[in-house]
């Protein structure tokens, strides 16, 4: 009896799945999401849609393909049906845009990497380390299943300073095997207003599994604590790391600083001006570097109110605090003999515009520094929050190669 009932339900289920309602519903939802591939978010509330839509584009392509198939299978007559098919095709094209732009972006960064680091820049990296690198800049299966991450040792909430009664902590991520490892010190973003060392933990775990000690550090937040308090906290963290390097299995001659957004700003200031640790490389994900330029030329639309963020961070406008704005701008510290820099900027960024990344890149190159610019045309600010998206897959592929070249080459010379 139960089997007979189930057999009766199957035709009903099939009919439901191919009903116009399902195909129209899929089409409407996917079209709404796909529009954010090209539409900038006018408010902070809508910003996650603009960030996420390009990064889930493989999913959107799949949904549009299914909806289009269902609509073609269940054919109808009339204008409504024609309009529906046109919307399906339009949405499918929108969702394909990031994947269509991917080859050109990949070719551009591959050429830069070879031009700046050498045609065979991974030759001095041990074979065992090269074997762990991602094999391709984009793996379609990873876009659906996620990027595999192996187990690592994690020590959380290690206190390193207590300025003005604010308890600052760091997270430590290490490979499972005890050893001596190069270190990546990461600084989170959040407009200098919010955040903690748990941010972007997938990256920290991933890189630890690749054979690095990753130290994610904290800092005090504006507006209660204004610049240079955040920079002082970064230096305090570096001093603490230096003291505990042996216990944490860190090779102090192989240190990279990495930050995202506000954290990239602090990483650049530290590496380009004065650091209590020798820095072999800097990785800057969409970091503000010209704060006067950013204030005078905000993005449009300006979802987070960039000027208000800068006033909260620095305590006033560039007209009121010109010297402080200059002091807080990493681009003003560019000089010869800086550590190699990887600059990763989103072409559609409406918080830190990509043109500021290009200006920094040009200044670094003009002063004889090794710098590489990876600009992702379809991406928005904070694209790597979707860790398995096309943008982060591209950025991760070259970030891990850049860091392997800087920190794992067997022919490196210790910094004195």
Image (tube, grey):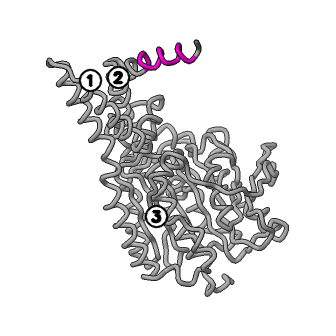
Between the C-alphas of marks 1 and 3, the distance is: 39 Å
Give the residue number, with chain letter if any, for mark 3: 136
Give the residue number, with chain letter if any, for mark 2: 18
Point out the tag, 2 or 3, that comes first from the N-terminus.
Answer: 2
Residue shown at 41% from the left, 59% from the top: 357
Q: Which residues are magenta?
A: 3-13
- Label 1 CA crowd tier, 10 Å (few <14, some 14–19, many 20+): few
> Where does the image place residue 14, in percent across and percent down from the top left?
40, 22
User: Which of 250/266 is in front?
Assistant: 250
Vertical order, 307 against 286 (above or below): above
Between the C-alphas of marks 1 and 2, the distance is: 7 Å
Residue 233, numbered circle? none
- Label 3 CA crowd tier, 10 Å (few <14, some 14–19, many 20+): few
Secondary structure mostly seen in the magenta stretch: helix
Q: Secondary structure at mark 2?
A: loop
Determine contact: label 1, label 3, CB under 8 Å. Answer: no
Residue shown at 45% from the left, 40% from the top: 52
Give the residue number, with chain letter if any, for mark 1: 74
Point out the tag, 1 or 3, that comes first from the N-terminus.
Answer: 1
Between the C-alphas of marks 2 and 3, the distance is: 37 Å
Q: Is residue 362 magenta?
A: no
């Amino acid at each position: 009896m139960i089997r007979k009932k189930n057999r009766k339900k199957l035709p009903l289920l099939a009919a439901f799945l191919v009903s116009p309602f399902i195909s129209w519903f899929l089409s409407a939802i996917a079209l709404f999401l796909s529009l954010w591939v090209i539409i900038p978010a006018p408010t902070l509330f809508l910003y996650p849609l603009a960030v996420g839509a390009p990064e889930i584009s493989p999913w959107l392509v799949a949904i549009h393909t299914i909806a289009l198939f269902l609509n073609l299978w269940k054919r109808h007559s009339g204008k409504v049906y024609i309009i529906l098919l046109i919307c399906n095709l339009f949405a499918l094209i929108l969702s394909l845009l990031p994947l269509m732009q991917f080859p050109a972006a990949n070719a551009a960064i591959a050429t830069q990497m070879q031009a700046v680091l050498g045609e065979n820049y991974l030759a001095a990296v041990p074979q065992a380390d090269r074997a762990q690198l991602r094999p391709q800049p984009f793996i379609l299966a990873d876009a659906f299943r996620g990027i595999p991450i192996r187990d690592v040792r994690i020590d959380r909430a290690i206190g390193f300073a207590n300025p003005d009664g604010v308890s600052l902590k760091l997270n430590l991520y290490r490979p499972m095997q005890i050893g001596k490892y190069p270190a990546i010190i990461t600084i989170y973003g959040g407009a200098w207003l919010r955040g903690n060392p748990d941010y972007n933990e997938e990256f920290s775990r991933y890189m630890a599994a690749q054979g690095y000690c990753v130290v994610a550090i904290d800092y005090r937040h504006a507006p209660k604590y204004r610049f240079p308090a955040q920079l002082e906290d970064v230096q305090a963290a570096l001093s603490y790391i230096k003291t505990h390097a042996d216990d944490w299995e860190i090779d102090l001659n192989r240190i990279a600083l990495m930050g995202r957004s506000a954290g990239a700003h602090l990483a650049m200031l530290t590496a380009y001006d004065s650091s209590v640790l020798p820095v072999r490389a800097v990785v800057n994900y969409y970091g503000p570097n010209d704060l006067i330029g950013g204030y005078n030329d905000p993005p449009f639309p300006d979802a987070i109110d960039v000027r208000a963020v800068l006033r909260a961070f620095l305590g006033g406008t560039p007209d009121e605090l010109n010297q402080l704005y200059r002091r807080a701008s990493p681009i003003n510290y560019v000089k010869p003999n800086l550590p190699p820099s990887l600059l990763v900027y989103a072409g559609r960024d409406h918080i830190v515009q990509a043109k500021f990344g290009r200006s920094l890149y040009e200044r670094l190159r003009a002063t004889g520094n090794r710098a590489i610019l990876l600009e992702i045309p379809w991406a928005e600010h904070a694209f790597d929050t979707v860790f398995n998206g096309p943008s982060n897959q591209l950025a991760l592929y070259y970030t891990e190669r850049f860091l392997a070249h800087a920190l794992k080459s067997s022919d490196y010379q210790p910094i004195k």
